Image (cartoon, rainbow, N blue to C red):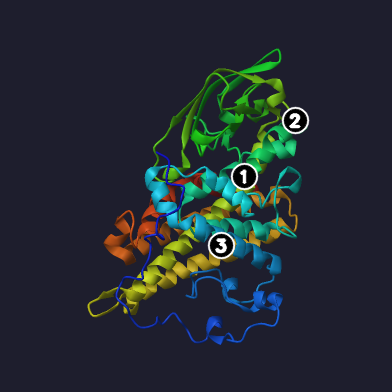
Amino acid sequence: QRANTQHTRPPSSTSFSNLPPTSSSSLDCPCHPLKKMSSSSSSSSAKAAKTEAFGEPITFCEPYWYANYNSPYYKDTHRAFRAKVRSFVEKEVMPFCHEWDESGVYPVELRQKAYEAGVLGATWPEEYGGTPPQDFDAFHDLILVDELARCGSGGIIWAVFLGFGIALPPILSVGSEYLREKVARDVIMGKKIMSLAVTEPYAGSDVAGLQTTARREGDFYIVNGEKKFISGGMLASYFTTAVRTGGSGMGGVSLLLIERDMPGVVLRRQKTQGWWSSTTTYISFEDVKVPVKNLIGKENDGFRPIMHNFNHERFVLAATSNRYARVCLEDAIKYARVRKTFGKRLLDQPVIRAKIAEMARLVESTHALIEQTAYQMATGVDDKLLGGPIALLKVQATKVMEFCAREASQVLGGASCIRGGHGERIERLYREVRVNAIGGGSEEILMDLAVRQAKL
């Protein structure tokens, strides 16, 4: 059954308010910017946006610039967009993640709610229904994925907000006007769902080795083959599908738009370690007749747009993974502030403070690397130059996520092993470590890619 869409459930069970009260944390340092803020109101909204701290008032629980440390990257338009996304996520997503994850589904109405809130269409062109913020740049993109990831559920954010971000770009970049008009507006506005179908049982990172075939017969391609690990596939109306139309290797790969209701398309739900609500799918194509007008770009030139997709996909995976790590750090700090053992708070134990410090060191340094990469993207550095650095960034972020999920689990102890309760987000994210580390290119593949591209 589909999850309750009335949103009547009380706030998320990830709450620390019912644990024993205690004194304020030593992390509430008097030199922290939050302690230095004036209590008087600002004379203008623009000035207030620059002087008021945002989000959790506990050190390390938010990116540095939320607490008014200086940054060269962010303007008022970024701050306004941050507030918009956070408001939506805290009201419409965070209270229900556990419910949706446990049921394995989410209310499809969430997509249109997100569009109406200015979130779902924020990174897309206005001519196809997009709602980008003023002066949109790579830092708006970073804010979007970082704020979405606060919910601590990769399944939800990839199924609803991010999955079509790797399926739609080839249509917009190399697709015909017919395909853009057919697909883009409905997908961007949340009326239809779209998934990327590249991975196969025998071809993952080795995209050039894919085996699904598309044989030309008059005005149609006849498609046969299988796709595996397709995020969001069970609810998708469209699939941006990699097929072999020519010889072996990358030169024989094309992209087709395959529609769910075409005869011969068979979908099967796959049970996964994490991302339970992502409706991961195994797809079989059995003599599917696809009109030639559904060819995306040129025949035998599909490998190029697939590769162009990878940089942004890996950047998004890096940004979300580092926020997941920060979520683990946040929940560990909050728990350690109030949980008492052997007569004192966990946070008063040196070994626990050392764990917090190590997690914070990794999360903050990785966030700086993410911003460094976003700046290169915002200033137009060639995608080919960024391939290697973004590959290493993704590896860095997923390794930090894995470390923080483990260390936060050690801080919470048994509470992190229970689905729901104080350790809800940590337990769920621990199950999602591997899909982040492997999806979009495994750590081993990406590290090798970076060194090869460096031409040492």
Front position in the image: 372 or 32: 32
Image point (71%, 45%), residue name = 129
Sequence-first tag of 1 and 3: 3
Q: Which residue lies furthest to the left in this view?
A: 342
Amino acid type, residue under disc 1 in the picture:
Gly
Expressed as whole percent of the image width and height from the top left, the position of residue 191 reads 61, 40
Is 260 rendered above or below residue 340?
above
**Quadrant location of residue 66?**
bottom right
Q: Label 1 to label 2, Cα distance in Å?
A: 20 Å
Question: Which mark identifies residue 310?
Answer: none
Classify 402 as above or below 174.
below
Q: Residue 86 carries which label?
A: 3
Assess disc 3: are there few (<14), some (14-19) or many (≥20) residues with their C-alpha within 10 Å of its C-alpha. Answer: many
x, y percent for residue 314: 58, 49
Residue under circle 1? 165
Front of the two marks 1 and 3: 3
| Towards the viewer: 53 or 329 | 53
Left or right relative to 374: residue 4: left
Between marks 1 and 2 in the image, the one whose residue lies nearer the viewer: 2
Rendered location of residue 210, percent (x, y): 56, 28
Instruction: Name the secondary structure under disc 2.
Output: helix
Tell me the kind of residue under disc 2. Answer: Tyr
* Label 1 SS: helix
Q: Which amino acid does label 3 sit on?
A: Arg
> Disc 2 designates what residue?
178
In this picture, is 436 found above or below 346? above
